[in-house]
Amino acid sequence: MAKKISSILIANRGEIALRVIRACKETGIRSIAVYSDEDVRAVHVKRADEAYHIGAAAPSQSYLNMTKIMETAKAAGADAIHPGYGFLSENENFSELCEKNNIIFIGPSSKTMQITGDKMKCKAVMKKAKVPTVPGSDSVIDDVEKAADIAHEAGYPVMLKSAFGGGGRGIRLCKDEKQLRQEFEMASAESRAAFGKAALFVEKYLQRIRHIEFQLLRDTHGNGRHLFERECSIQRRHQKLIEMSPSPVVDQKTRERIGEIAVRAADAVDYHNAGTAEFLRDPEGNFYFIEINSRLQVEHPVTELVTGQDLVKLQIAVAQGEEIPFKQEDLKMNGCAIECRINAEDPFYDFAPSVGPVPYCNLPYGPGVRVETYLYPGCTVSGYYDSLTAKLLTWGRNFEEARVRMRNALDEFVIEGINTTIPLYKTIMDEPNFIKGELSTDYLDRFKIFDKMNEDVKNQANSKAKAAVAAALLHSELVRKGAAPQSAVQKSRWKSRVTM
C-alpha cells in the first residue's frame, strides 16, 4: 500500500511541468520544480511552491541527471516524483532508483518498464496474451543476413526498427533487399546513438495505415480501464503532429473490442498508472498492437476533453494506492477534441528548428479552446530542448465544430520571433481529405499538403496586397472628394500585423 502523497517533485520542464503543478494545486499537494541554467526565468519555476537548480542547460547535466534529481528530491522532502514525458519518463533505471530510495515514481514499476521498453519482449508477452501484433521477427536481430531472411518471409516492404526507445528514431523503411542491406548499419548506429543499444527487429510495413492509440489506466488493485481512442495518423517522420478523439473510423463496437484488447495488454505486463496502447489499423480494418508507451502522452488533454477526466490527478491517485474511481461502463465519450502541436520549426524549410527570443505572443481563447504552453512575451525558445512550444486544443459537440474552432484559434495564435508549424495546421484544417477523415500516416505526402500550404500563403499574400491597393484607391477617391484628410490613413498596429 503506497503512502499518501503530500509533495511531488516534477522532473521536467515547460508545459508538462506546468500541467503537473496545476494538478498539485488542485489536490493540495506541494509542488517542487527543478530547472537548468537555461530555465532560470521559466514559468514553471515561478508557479511551483519550491524550485531548485539542478545543473547546466544540456539535458545530460540537468533533466537527465538522475543522481542530481534524486538528491534534490530527498533534500526537498518529496514523497513522489512525476517524470512528465520525455527525459526520464520511460527510464527503467530511474524508476528503480525511486523504488530504492522509497520515493513514489508516478508511473509503472521498473519491472514493467523492462518489458514495455523492449519491443521484442513486449511483443512476446502480447502474443502469449493473444493480442494481435504486426508480422515480423520475434526477437532482436544483430545480423543483416537474418534480417534479410525474415524480410523475405514477411514480404517487402518492411521496417527496420530499434527494439528500444521511440519518437521515430532508429526506424528505416526498406522497399527491397538491397535497401535493407544499405539501411541496416545506419539504423543500428542511430539506435545506438539514441538509446545506447543497437538491437533491431524487422516488421512488415503496412501501407495506408492509421495510427490509433487507446488511453489506459490501471491501478495496483488489478483494475484496468481504457479511456477510448485517439487518432494520431497525421505525422511527419513518425512524429505525431495532430491528434483527435474520436477517430473517424472507430465505431462503438470497435471501440469496445479494441479497448478490451488494450486493457488485456496492460494486464499482461502488470501495468500500473496511466499509459497508452498503440495500434496500427490497416485499410481492411485490422488492428495490430505495436507498443505500450509507459508514461503520460503529450496528447493526453484530448482524452480529458472528451471524457471529463483529469488524467494527472488520476495518476497521482493511483500512485498513492487508490482504486480507479469509476467502472468502464461509467465512461461516456462527449463530443470531439482536436490537438495541434505547435512546434518551433519552419514547415516551409523542411521543419528546420527555430529558436530565440519571443518578443510578443497572443494566445487564443474562447468556448472550447484550451492552450497549454510555457510561452510568454519576452521568453526565449531554447535550442537545448524539444521543439514543442505549445499544445492548442479545441472541443466541439461534433468534429465540425471542433475543426472550425481550431481553424479560428490558429488564426488568433500569434508567436513572434520564431517560425512555427501553425501555417501547416491552418492548411490541414481546411483540407478536404482531412475534413472527410481520409487519414493515414502518409497523409502529408499523399495529399501534397506542403504544396497546398505554400499555395495558401501565396493566396493570402495576394489577398492582402489587393486589399491594400483597394484601401489606397478608396482613400485617394475620398481625398479627391474632400471626404478624407490628405495625410496617410493611420492603421491600427493590431490590424497591420501579418500572422501565420
Image (cartoon, rainbow, N blue to C red):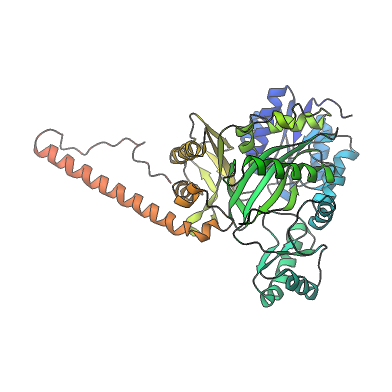
Where in the figure is residue 333, as x and y percent of width and height?
62, 33
Residue 491 vs 207, above or below: the answer is above
In the current view of this chain or complex, which residue is farthest to the top? 28
Question: Image quarter for residue 166?
Answer: bottom right
The residue depicted at 43 percent of the width and 40 percent of the height is 411
Where in the figure is residue 420, as x and y percent of width and height?
51, 48
Residue 447 vs 246, above or below: the answer is below
**Residue 336 in sight from this viewpoint:** yes
Residue 2 vs 181, above or below: the answer is above
In the current view of this chain or complex, which residue is farthest to the bottom? 178
**Residue 48 in sight from this viewpoint:** no
Quarter of the figure that contains the N terminus: top right
The residue depicted at 79 percent of the width and 44 percent of the height is 264
Q: How many marks?
A: 0
The residue depicted at 70 percent of the width and 33 percent of the height is 311
In the current view of this chain or complex, which residue is farthest to the left? 481
Residue nearer the viewer, 313 or 11:
313
* Residue 213 left/right relative to 163: left
Where in the figure is residue 119, as x and y percent of width and height?
79, 56
* Residue 239 left/right relative to 396: right
Where in the figure is residue 310, as x and y percent of width and height?
67, 30
Question: Image quarter for residue 6?
Answer: top right
